[in-house]
Amino acid sequence: MLRTLRVRDLAIIDELELVLEPGLNVITGETGAGKSILLQALDLALGGRPDADVVRTGADEAVVEAVFADVPAPVRAILSGAGVPVAEELLIRRVIGAGGRTRAYVNEALGSLALLRELAPYLLRVYGQDEHHALRRVESHRELLDAVGGLDSTVDEMRRRHARLQASAQALAELRARQQASAERVELLQFQANELEKASLVAGEEESLCAERTRLAHAERLATLASGAEGALYSDDGAVVGVLGRVAGTLREAERLDPTLEPTRKLVETALAELEEAGRTLGRYAEGVHAEPERLEHVEERLAQIARLRRKYGGTVDDLIRKRDEIAAELGATAGGGEAVAVLQAEVETARREAAEWAGRLSIERRRVARELERDLAQELRTLALDGARFTVRFGDTNGERAVAPEGWDEIEFFLSTNPGEEPRSLARVASGGELSRIMLALKTLAAAEQHGATLIFDEVDAGIGGAVAEVVGRKLKQLGKARQVLCITHLALIAAFAEHHVAVAKRVRDGRTQSTARPLSANERVAELARMLGGTKLTRETRDHAEQLLRQARSRSGRSQRAEP
């Protein structure tokens, strides 16, 4: 049950706190006073998307708080699963920044929008003023039947199975499309695979070959340079090694006179050893370097081959190797397509069988619900001044062809006869606006039993009705309020008179700013509000008397209705 609604800096609401009671609560006020903002606030509290200009002009943020008492068991289970503290009351707070960013808190713990939206169906159910027009769309009848029968979870499973079937069928179709690729494509891939495979590319090969080509092309020059360097270091008269050897001998003699020269002598001897090794290495290098025209030609051809492949396919040698592997994988998938098709075909058949089995189960459930609905709705319609009305649910004839859709394979349509002796006809074509309003209210009343104690909000269900019909709708709303908390936004005094609690929404200008307020009415204030609804802004003694009479009649008729109930 919604206990308290607090709103700050939302649209034209400056600051508002509204305490709501069990039973039937009506909310009234002139057009534009801000009744719809209260619904907007509740929508935001339960995860709705805020409009860009929802924050009151000049404010940094808007805040909506909703307090729920008598928290139903499914809500407690969801909170526990989300790690949110569970208490006797549930406090939801939504903060909307002027820049559009929002924060949500559930029992003072930071919560996600997904959590709010999961909680929403168990806390509030809103029925809009034009919802009865859905009855004119035959495709909505199946959805209404499912709602009345509490088949939501069964239908959700049907959608999941159908989605699996669609995914499997799509995967099979895509594989077959790939298999039907043109022969030119397969031939091209095979040619490219052969070409790249025959090239036997190795990572880093191009850089190594470029270095070898440079050595081979300048072999004679390299040999001359290396020989000259070797002679200067090691083998020629006056070579560096010989000079350095004599220097080392001199230092050894000096060291005997001054031991502090030992480190210097060791440095010279170390240098001498390294220079000797360098000279020997240069000698071997000079002997090994010689012109190899055939090897140079081979290297040039290999580099030309690599360059040609790079121009053809693009990228580096590493990219060419990757391309070769990708082509091989694609050819492998094409070659093994027959086995893959068989696997996917089996998956499709399994998914189709499971979807069909569930569609059959769902159809049986719907037919059971349809029989119960025909029986129960007849009683509901009698309480809504449609005595003798016959309501039937008909299932379409599929002529043996049952294509499984996301919601099963049933085609459902409601039929109605409001005149004794007349055969029921398509409700979408024969029902008047007032009859549609009452039928929808009856359907929602029956569906309410499946909605886990959620507060029911009716937004101007009086659209298109009046007189005696409005009175029976008001009586039905009050009856519904005996089992559930009901909030009803209405413009009809005939309906408002049946409420146990009356909230008035008003708009005023204060200090140059428009403000919307909402507050419960006392008994005298309630008479005045009903008189306003009956006669407009100018209140007369007659309209006030009429308002008092409506209240007396509502109390009297509600009492008779209670005594008439079994």
Image (cartoon, rainbow, N blue to C red):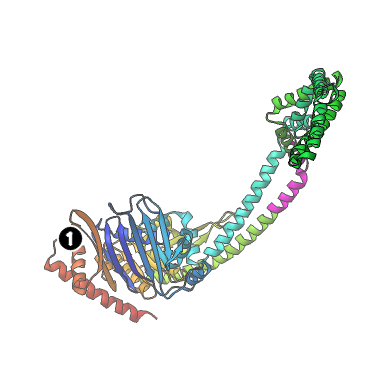
Query: Quick check: 202 above or below 219?
Result: below
Quadrant (top left, top right, bottom left, bottom right) of the C terminus: bottom left
Question: Residue tagged by mark 1?
Answer: 536
Q: Nearer the viewer, residue 42 or 263?
A: 263
Please say whether residue 334 is one of the residues in the magenta stretch.
yes
- Residue under the point 56% across and 66% down: 365
The answer to whether residue 516 is left or right of residue 255 is: left
Picture quadrant where residue 34 is located: bottom left
The answer to whether residue 480 is left or right of residue 550 is: right
**Secondary element at tag 1:** loop
How many numbered markers are drawn? 1
Residue 222 appears in the rendering: yes
| Magenta-drawn stretch, dominant element (helix, strand or loop) | helix
Please say whether residue 322 is one of the residues in the magenta stretch.
no
User: Magenta segment, which residues?
Assistant: 327-348
Q: Nearer the viewer, residue 69 or 416?
A: 69
Picture quadrant where residue 109 is located: bottom left
Residue 334 appears in the rendering: no
Q: Position of residue 161 (x, y in %)?
A: 61, 57
Q: Amino acid at mark 1?
A: Gly
Which residue sits furthest left? 541
